Each structure stands twice: as structure tokens, then as C-alpha cells.
Amino acid sequence: MGPTNKSHVSPSTFMLMGIPGLEHMHVWIGIPFCSMYVVAVVGNVTILAVVRAERSLHEPMFLFLCMLSVTDLVLSTSTLPRMLCLFWLGAHDISFEACLVQMFFIHSFTAMESGFFLAMAIDRYVAICDPLRHATILTHSRIAKMGAAVVLRGVAFFSPHPILLEQLPYCKTHIIAHTYCEFMAVVKLACVDTGATKRYSLSVASVIGSCDGFFIALSYVLILRAVFHLPSREASLKALGTCGSHVCVILVFYSTAVFTFLTHRFGHNVAPQVHILIANMYLLVPPFLNPIVYGIRTKKIRDCVLNFLKIKIA
């Protein structure tokens, strides 16, 4: 390989275009994105602080919620600050290494988010369908193992992404038509056949997403069946309200992720700005909604926060 070709293997920088066709709106689009990021950071940090400080909250549901909060913080922080620099400061350049690192965090932590949604669905299933054995089934040791398995799965399946892209020659444009270093947007810039690389990525995403989605759906179907058999109407409505809010968050996450996946596979006629905005939603909206749905709507966490605020004010 000659010197010219070598220079194409590892470009020093890529250029993030942002949202094609909406460049004149970048400043305004950045305002709601920044607002969601602030709420996500404050909400998730609050959940972590409250659960850490209050020993009565060291239960499976809240331990899984802490794992989800850490995932949300990493996922949103790996994308939003860089995206806001693009929208507000016009900072389009991103180094090749930083691009690969961002890509790894985005895809691996998205898989972890899906895994923690499944773990929380399993916890709710056991708590509602087999409450007497809840504490013995979901021990702290078992919770730690489930959390470790989710993390290892995300790292193991998505570590090859940056490694594969690092080996590709890039002799086309170095402009990424996206707001962040998304795998499919980067792989399109390679000047060799990337069919096998694309198939690996799409296969991993589809297997993880479909398996998690199936078991989450099964868990909530069994939960709903148990809820409708509860003797107390008040208890049934309370359980339905809690499950309903959880299902809404999960649906937002999976519907936007599935739309992005199908657009890469089949949606060649979807407008780029629509595709990119939806792709941003599944990274921004769940970290924004999770603290509200799982935190504010959870009485124990809400009471702890209010008690803390009363002490501070007093």
C-alpha cells in the first residue's frame, strides 16, 4: 500500500454536519436539547444521591434504577455536550479517536439501557406475581450479577465496532451527515465493501433489541394478568398506573430505536433530517424521562427528596 493510501486509513478528523437541511435552526434546536440534558443530569444524580443516602431504598427496584441512572448519565453526556458545541459554537471537527470512543459509548450503553429495562421488568414481575419470594429471589448478590451481565454484554458485543472501523480505509469524504458519530453514518464513508461490517452491527442490534423487547413484553403481560386478579380495585389501579408509566418510557426508547434501525435497513426514502432527529430522540428522551417516571412518580423517592428539601429550607 502506497503512502497516499496509508493516509486514508486513519483520517485525523471527521466533520459532523449536524442535521442536514436544518443548519439554520441548529441554535434553536439546541435549546430544548440542552434543557432535556440538564433535567436528565439533575434528575439522575438526585436519584443516585437519594438511594445512596437512604438505606430503606436499598431494594432491588431502586438498585436497578441506580444502574439505569448511571447508564443514562453516560449515554447523554457522551453525546449532548459535543452536540451543543456543534449547534451553538459551530464546532464541526471531531478527531478520529474521539469519534470511535463516542461511538463505543453510545452503542454499548444503549444496549445496557435495554438490559436494565429488562432487569427492572423482571423485578416488577417478581414483586407483583410472587411478592413473598421477592427478597429471596432478587438478593443483592443476584442483582449485582445481573448488572454485571448487562454491562459485560454491552461491552462485549459493541467493542468490535470501533476496532472494525479503525481498520477501514476512508478515501471518500470525511463529512459525517449526523449530529454524533453513529456507526452506520461513519461506515458509509469507507471506500471498500462494508457489507460484512454492516451485517454484524445490524445483527447484534436486532438480536439484543428483539430478545430484550420480547422478554419485557412477556413480563408486563404476566404482570397485567396478575394485576387484574388483585382483590382490591385500588391496588389494581395503583399497579396499573405504575406499570403504565414504565411501559410508556420503554415504548419511547424501543420505538425510536426500531425506527432508526429500520431506516438504516429499508428507509432509503426517509428524509435525513427526520432520521437524525429520531436517532437523537432515543439518546435524549429516555435519560430525560426516566428520572421523572421512576423518580418523581415513585412515592419513596419523592418523600425522601421532599424531606431533604424541608431540612435544607429549615
Image: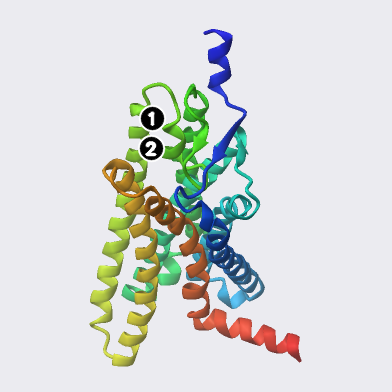
Tell me, yes or no, if residue 217 can be seen here: yes
Q: What residue type is labelled 2?
A: Ser
Location of residue 89 with respect to 6 vertically, above or below: below
Residue sitting at x 35%, y 47% = 208
Location of residue 153 with respect to 43 vertically, above or below: above
* Residue 214 position by quadrant: bottom left
Label 2 neighbour load within 10 Å: few <14, some 14-19, many 20+: some
* Residue 217 percent across, percent down from the top left: 28, 63
Q: Look at mark 1 in the image and give the residue it sits on.
A: 197
* Residue 8 percent across, percent down from the top left: 54, 20
Q: Give the spatial CA distance, label 1 vs label 2.
A: 6 Å
Q: Which of 195 and 205 is in front in this view?
A: 195
Q: Please tell me the numbered disc located at residue 201.
A: 2
Residue sitting at x 29%, y 91% = 233
Location of residue 297 with respect to 218 vertically, above or below: below
Tell me, yes or no, if residue 139 can be seen here: no
- Say which quadrant the C terminus sits in: bottom right
Q: Is mark 2 on a helix, strand or loop?
A: helix
Residue sitting at x 52%, y 58% = 25
Label 1 neighbour load within 10 Å: few <14, some 14-19, many 20+: some
* Residue 133 percent across, percent down from the top left: 39, 71
